[in-house]
Every structure is written in structure tokens, then in C-alpha cells.
Image (cartoon, helix red, strand yellow):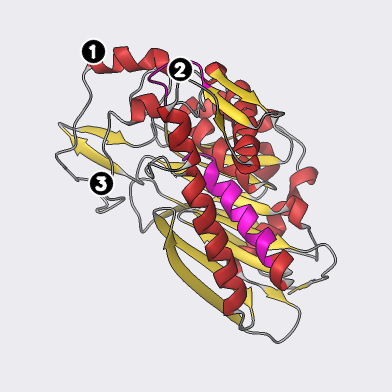
Amino acid sequence: MTRHTKKNLTYFAGAVILFLLGMSLFIVNKPEKIRNYVKVRMGTFVEIVLKGDNPEAAETAFEEISRLEEIFSSYKPDSEISRITKNAGIKPVRVSADVIEVLETALRISAASHGAFDPTIGAVSKLWDFSKVGGMNTEEGRLTVDSPIPSKAALARQLPLVDYKKISINKKASTVMLDEKGMALNLGGIAKGYIVRKAFLKMQEVHGVNWAVIRAGGDMTVFHDPDFSIEIEKSKDPLTVGVQHPRKKAIIIGMLELTPLGETFSTRAASSISTSGDYERFFIRDGVRYHHILDPRTGMPADASQSATILSRDPILADALSTSVFILGAEKGMALIEATKGVEGVIIDKDGVVTVSSGLGEIYKPHN
């Protein structure tokens, strides 16, 4: 079953077309070969796709990713994020412009989602351990591990410390402070999009790279310089991107289909896609699925959705909104999508019902 919401299609169509082209790599300009460079970064495989042989540019991007990972990781004790957490309720911590920018964006999304997205979720997420939990290991999802399930008492103690309104940012002094002891930052739901964007901009600055695809885990962004014109291969057959079944890895439940006529886009309007799902890191115990996307209101795994896919011109927005929408569920999540300019999405709710934003309504095709 599929539902559609209502919104004008035209605004987003161009960005979606180019994103889909990037996924399928149906872009022709010069007879250059596509080269892929892959390393493990941010706890996942990061793939950088460039035109021609340019390992130096790829290495520059990986170095930038590593630099920013040292800043944003909640698991590295000397990161800026960890230092903010250590000094919660004690004193402000001087941080880089990168942290200020990401936190300001995070707070805007927190407000827009009425707290469904909350960068202070770290106070609760530390009670859980999904570090040894795999993803969709079997189609039936019968994966069990000895991961602890927090008690109601433990959650009750930590939940008051999850509150994005208690983050104090002083841009003039370049400081950040968490207002209460015990609060903890976790920017895992937004930092990846920011890091990916910065990696491309560094390649552009140092090596003059004008086109790239960067994949990080389940997220992908196509970047293109506005001064570098491209030609889209014209075909009668539509370009397609499949929406994966949240419970059966080998099955596609829907397709996004487009026939391009020729478009260009800029780095300021990169085409990005991000998916959050309860099949990424999870375990099942006594018939209950426990996964790593926690609802800040309860401290428990969010149970309104099976997956949420966001398409946006901004990889940071796509990253954070896929988490927000997943937690909110179909009705409230789709309302947020429709209210956010330049964003479209596909939500699969807890019962497997697919809801598609109206900007994709004529593009999304159920796949039988």
C-alpha cells in the first residue's frame, strides 16, 4: 500500500534527476574513466568516485574526513565533542568553527522536529551497546546478541539530561557548553553529512575537482561545480533507483524513475540521499527488535518506522532529517518533509505502509 502527499513537483525535480544520474553514473562529458577509491572512515566504508585517475585528490578527501572525525567522534576521548561532554555543567569549551556550524544546524532541526532530533541523545545512547551488532544479516532478522537492554529506572535517570535547549553556544567566544552535569553530545545523526560536504570542498580547493560522488554507509551525495557543464545521456528508458525492503535485503519494494532531458547543478545545491532504518544495527530478543535509532522522548528504539529516505540538496540536511523523520513516523515525518524547502522523502512505517512525498508522487513506482 502506498500513500502520497500533496506538494508541487517542479522545485525538486532537477535535483532529483541529477542525484539519480549520479547514482547510476549515466553522465557523459569526456571519455574519462570513472575511478573508485574506498577506505574505512567514520565506522563505515567511504567510497569516493572521481573522473580519471586522481588518487591525490581522493587522499586529500580522506585526510579531511579523518581530520573532522577526530573533531566530531563521541568515541575519541580527546575530540572536541568529548571535551564538551566532559565539561558538561562545569564550563564552556572552546571549539572550532566546524563544531559551531554543525551544532547550529542541529539545533534548527531539533526545533523543527520538536525534539525528535536531539544532539544530546548521548546521555541515553551510552546505556545501549550496538557496537557489536550487525545489520541485515538475515532476511528474517533473527539476530540475537548479549547486548544489554537498559532498565526503566536507568532510562528515567538519564532522560532529563536529553534536552537540546540546554546547549549554550557563544559564537563570539567560539565556545559551547552543556548546561547540566551528565549531559552528553552525540552528533552521529548529522556530522556525516557535514564531513562529506567538506571533503568535496577540500578536493575542489586543492585539486580543482569539479565532479565527485561520495558514498558513506547508506548515504550518497553527487557534487558538481556550477562552472563545469555536463551533458546528460539521453535515453528513452528512465533512470531508476530502488527503495530497499526493510525486512528482505534482496527485494526492492519501489522504484524512483526519471527520464532526464539535461540539467546542471552546483556544489551549493548538491543532490544527496540518506536512509535511516531499523535494519542497520539491530538485534531481536524475545520477538522484539532493538535498533540504534533512539527516540529522545523515551530513550528506547523508535518504533514508528521501518525506514525513512530523504532526498535533499544539502547532505547535512539529508543526514539529520532521515533520523528525524524515522523517529516521527509517517504522519508527522511527512509533514516535516513537506514543510521543508528542497526536501522530498519516502517513509515506510512500522506496518510496512509506504508514504511518498508529493514531489516524488509521479516518480515513485511500486515494484511488485
Residues marked 1 and 3 touching at CB (< 8 Å): no
Cα–Cα span, label 2 and label 1: 23 Å
**Mark 3, residues whose alpha carbon is within 10 Å: few (<14), some, or many (≥20)?**
some
- Foreground label between 2 and 3: 2
Is 331 displayed left or right of 182 in the figure?
right
The residue carrying mark 2 is 89
Cα–Cα span, label 2 and label 3: 32 Å
- Foreground label between 1 and 3: 1
Comparing 161 with 364, the one in front is 161
Residues marked 2 and 3 touching at CB (< 8 Å): no
The residue carrying mark 1 is 153
Residue 279 appears in which quarter of the rendering? top left
Q: Which residues are magenta?
A: 178-203
**Residue positioned 66% across, 66% down in the render:** 203
Is residue 310 visible in the rendered image? The answer is yes
Q: Earlier in the sequence, mark 2 or mark 1?
A: 2
Picture layout, residue 211 above or below residue 321? below
Q: Position of residue 5 (x, y in %)?
A: 64, 32
Q: Secondary structure at mark 2?
A: loop
The residue carrying mark 3 is 133
Is residue 186 visible in the rendered image? The answer is no
Residue 186 falls within the magenta-colored stretch: yes
**Which residue type carries mark 3?**
Val
Q: Earlier in the sequence, mark 1 or mark 3?
A: 3
**Residue positioned 66% across, 58% down in the render:** 19
**Residue positioned 72% across, 28% down in the render:** 172
**Residue positioned 47% across, 50% down in the render:** 70
Q: Earlier in the sequence, mark 2 or mark 3?
A: 2
